[in-house]
Image: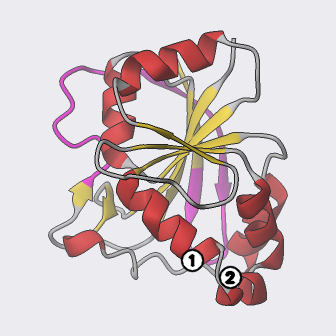
Amino acid sequence: MRHLSVYNFLSLNGCYKGLNGDISWHQHGAEENSFSEKSMEPGNTLLFGRITYEMMAGYWSSPAAFEQSPVVAEGMNKAEKIVFSTTLKTADWKNTQLIKENIVEEVRKLKQSNGKNMTILGSGTIITQLAEANLIDSYQIMIDPVVIKNGTPIFNNIQCNINLKLIDTKTFKSGVVLLNYAIE
């Protein structure tokens, strides 16, 4: 069975984005960028909702991304990607498959098929749906030392409790803390 993980950054008050999708508060330095480069699992399939997909595709395929973070940009562009959207007509970013219907059932099928492990980046609405369906196996949460106003919680309107077990932590010099959790 394929492993499904979440990798996301949050504000100290549990938000993954601010008003109008603002993530400018997420400021990582060289140490965090180095960690991102090392943790790019070759061969993982990346999962996105439409909004995160459009943001990621726009940035990681740009010359600025290749200039600022060439290793991560190369990994993001080479990775197999799936975007879940009922409104997108096409998904033009290299190596992207578009799934338009029944996210939970499609991910359930993907998990039971042979293939690469999968990681959800951003995409809080997708995370909530898949967490409620008990399809997520682990979480990597990077906590930024900032509190934002008018943010959206990562588990916005979740309808169940999820028990997690802390597996590992890493503290960066900037005050960012990475928490690794598995489902209990």
Image: 8 above or below 165? below
**Residue linked to disc 1:** 59
Residue 64 picture location, percent across and down: 66, 90
Residue nearest the observer in this picture, 149 or 22 = 22
Q: In which quadrant of the rendered view does residue 5 lie? A: top right
Residue nearest the observer in this picture, 56 or 85 = 85
Tell me if mark 2 has few (under 14), some (14-19) or many (20+) residues whose alpha carbon lies within 10 angstroms of its own: some
Image: 19 above or below 160? below
Q: Residue placed at 69% from the left, 11% from the top?
A: 1
Q: In which quadrant of the rendered view does residue 16 lie? A: bottom left
Q: Residue placed at 68% from the left, 12% from the top?
A: 113
Query: Element type at marker 2?
Result: helix
Label pair 2/1, CB-CB below 8 angstroms: yes
Closer to the N terminus: mark 2 or mark 1? Answer: 1
Q: Callout 2, which amino acid?
A: Ala
**Residue 46 appears left or right of 124:** right
Q: Where residue 65 is drawn, which disc sits there?
A: 2
Highlighted magenta segment, given as a residue range = 153-178
Q: CA distance from mark 2 to mark 1?
A: 6 Å
**114 inside magenta stretch:** no
**160 inside magenta stretch:** yes
Residue 174 visible to an observer of this rendering: yes
Query: Element type at marker 1?
Result: helix
Image: 41 above or below 118? below
Image: 2 above or below 148? above
Q: Callout 1, which amino acid?
A: Tyr
